[in-house]
Image: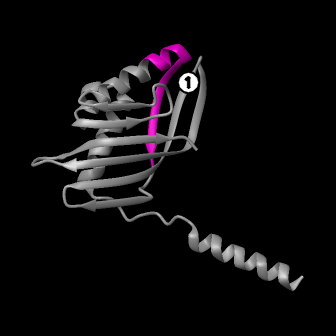
Amino acid sequence: MKITKTLALATLAIAITSASVPAASADPAVMATIQQFINGFNRGDTKAMLATCATEASVIDDFPPHEWQGAAACADWYAAYTATNEKEGITNGIVTVGKPWYQSVSGNRAYIVLPATFAFKQHGKPVTESNAVFTVTLRKSATSWRITGWAWSDH
């Protein structure tokens, strides 16, 4: 009994110390770029969304062909997203993100990991995919931060 109790306490201690601790607030300018991308996506404002992407970018997502790279990566991703939605009967997609779990901003480069949720309707019925992970890399130009890559990971 004592060994079981000690083992349970040790396991709990390991779980607590290895739990993910939310990162401090990310750089406001970095987060503003990410939020502009999300707001543009949520409003269907492709111009605002694509304005956040760097000239060369890389995208990974959960629908085919799963990866896009190059000068048109963000636009090509959005075209594939739209085609997939039409095929699957998906409408009204809304992405929300939480506070960053992890961030690293060093000079003109940034790496941010955020919890994310995707809510939508499929054939008219509400669906919510929670516990996703949105990982974004950015590069700062002379005037602003731009997304150089992002990955959406389902959980």
Residue 90 shown in magenta = yes
Q: Residue at x 27, y 60 (%)?
A: 105
In the picture, the quarter occupied by the N terminus is bottom right
Most extreme residue toward the right is 1
Residue type highlighted by circle 1: Lys
Residue 54 shows in the view: no
Q: Where residue 148 sits in the image (x, y, percent)?
A: 27, 42
Q: Taking 85 as reference, is 32 left or right? A: left
Q: Residue at x 32, y 44 (%)?
A: 34
Quarter-wise, where is residue 124 in the image? top right
Residues shaded magenta: 83-97
- The residue wearing badge 1 is 121
Residue 135 shows in the view: yes
Q: Residue at x 23, y 30 (%)?
A: 71
Q: Which residue is more in the foreground, 31 or 76?
A: 76
Most extreme residue toward the left is 142
Q: Residues within 10 Å of mark 1 (few under 14, many from 20)?
A: some
Q: Residue at x 55, y 17 (%)?
A: 88
Quarter-wise, where is residue 109 in the image? bottom left
Q: Where residue 41 sits in the image (x, y, percent)?
A: 36, 31
